Image: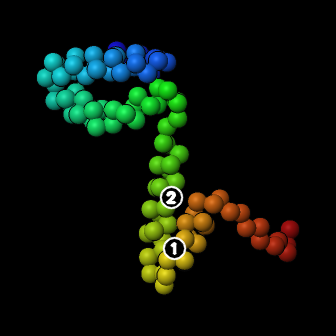
Amino acid sequence: MFEDFWQIKDTEEAESYLAFWCDFAMESKIQPFIRLVNTIKAHWRGIVRYIKSKISNGILEGINSKIQLAKKRARGYRNSRNFINMIYFTCGKLKFDYPQYFI
């Protein structure tokens, strides 16, 4: 039933469908559904905005995950510049072509 939501193209229709589904889920009194409804309500604007733009923040979440990894690796560096360099090395997909003397 909820999977139909992602096929909706109009934001007003999406909001009314989402409200209908949330009411339906709350009436079920199933605890996981109630928690889901609370999460949906907390992120309501972003969910409806996705219907209009079809853009998610998945890429940003992935970059943030890499930055957190760089933060762990950068522990013990002397200054923030070194931390920023570690972010570039981690997120920049830099390729270092080392010289190959013996091929």
Query: Which kind of residue does numbered mark 1 sit on?
Result: Phe
Say which residue appears at 85% left-offset and 75% top-offset. Answer: 101
- Image quarter of residue 76: bottom left
Question: On the picture, is 53 further left or further right than 12?
Answer: right
Residue 66 — which label?
2
Q: Viewer-proximal residue, 2 or 80?
A: 80
Circle 1 SS class: helix
Q: Position of residue 44 (x, y in %)?
A: 33, 32
Residue 3, can we see it?
A: no
Residue at the far left in the pictured view = 29
In percent of width and height, residue 84 lies at 54, 71
Residue that extends furthest to the front in the rendered view of this protein: 12
Mark linked to residue 83: 1
Q: Residues within 10 Å of mark 1 (few under 14, many from 20)?
A: many
Secondary element under disc 2, as helix, strand or loop, is: helix
Residue positioned 46% across, 31% down in the render: 50
